[in-house]
Structures are given as C-alpha cells and as structure tokens.
Amino acid sequence: MRYWRVLIPGATYFFTVNLLNRKSSLLTDHINQLRYVFLTARFHYPFTIDGIVILPDHLHVVMSLPKEDRNYSLRWNIIKGVFSKQIEPEETIVMSRKNKRERGIWQRRFWEHLIRDESDYEHHMNYIHYNPVKHGYVTTPTEWEYSSIHRFIQAGFLPKNWGCSDEFNLPNVGER
C-alpha cells in the first residue's frame, strides 16, 4: 500500500518524529546537537518553527514552509541524517538498515498533519505545549525546558499558568 502525503506549497504542518528506540533519551541527551541540526536545515532549506517540543524519544513540531516550497520530507531527511552522523554509534544496526546505509536511531517514517485552519492550528499548538505533562515528565507545561511554550508566554500569547489548572482539558490529538 502506498502512503500519500499532502504536499501544499507554503502550508503549515504538524509533525511527530520518533526515535526507533522509544525508551531512549537521545534527543534530550544531545539537545545541543539537535538544535544545531535544526539551524543547519533551516539555513539550507528555510522553514519556520511555529511551535516545538523535544521529549527524550520523540518530538512534535508545527512547521510552516516558504510560499513556493512543499518539500518537508527533504527537511526531515536532513534533520534526521545530520543528527545521526553527530551521534556516536551505540545502537544495534540490523542488516536491512546496514544495506540502506542507515543507523538505528530514527523510525523511518514520520507522521504529518496539514493544518487546516486557526482552530486546528491552536489545537495542535496546545497539544505540543501540553505533551510533556501528558507523558508524565512534568506536572505543568512550563516546567519542561525543551518547549516553545516559554516563547509563547514571553510574547504574551499564553498566560504563565497555562495548562496548570485541574479543569484544563486538552482534546486528544493522538500519539504517533
């Protein structure tokens, strides 16, 4: 079965990208390398990070592409590939990955969702910012260091106590 991706120039997408080993903490252990990789990819193939959260074993991003560009797969290929080259090999690499000159760091695919409107955008940004709480890493979103929530609070888009109330109920986007 062929997987069809929606490719629209200048669109905004929500992405989930996972490590192969979901018990790993590689992304937060090597956060500086990951930040460098994002900067490198953005330098060569511009995009805007509207919102992001980096968890130990996966990340979520809302990314906007330039007006005439629809190639988000190229950007993920660069991010995953350059990051993999910066990490010392410690993982077991199965033959099917060796034959394709791949490391055993990332899941081969990623999950994307085309942002359809303002409500959809807000929903996915809330999902990103609340995700560390959902996974039990922290009790409030602002406790998680690797999140764009701090930028949103500083800009006045969210209150300092966003997501801290017992009544706060975030609709489920679904974990990929």
Image (tube, grey):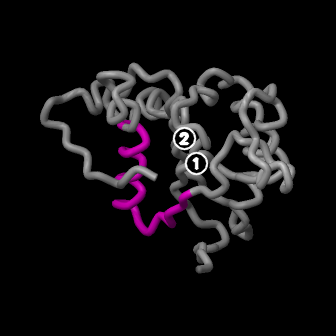
Left or right placement of residue 81 versus residue 117 in this view? right
Amino acid at circle 2: Leu
Give the residue number, with chain letter if any, for mark 2. 59
Compared to residue 105, the image places residue 12 above or below, namely below
Left or right placement of residue 168 versus residue 25 in this view? left
Labelled disc at residue 135: none
Q: Which residues are magenta?
A: 111-130
Say which residue appears at 74% left-offset and 46% top-offset.
Answer: 94
Say which residue appears at 29% left-offset and 31% top-offset.
Answer: 162
Say which residue appears at 60% left-offset and 73% top-offset.
Answer: 5
Say which residue appears at 66% left-offset and 59% top-offset.
Answer: 65
Q: Kindly check if marks 1 and 2 are in contact, taking CB atoms under 8 A apart as contact.
A: yes
Is residue 125 part of the magenta span, yes or no? yes
* Quadrant of res 80: top right
User: Label 1 to label 2, Cα distance in Å?
Assistant: 5 Å
x, y percentage for residue 176? Answer: 46, 52
* Quadrant of res 99: bottom right
Packing grade of label 1 (10 A; few <14, some 14-19, many >=20) is many
> Circle 2 — which element?
strand
Q: Residue furthest left?
A: 167
Amino acid at circle 1: Val
Is residue 59 part of the magenta span, yes or no? no
x, y percentage for residue 81? Answer: 79, 45
Give the residue number, with chain letter if any, for mark 1. 17
x, y percentage for residue 24? Answer: 57, 29
* Quadrant of res 133: top left
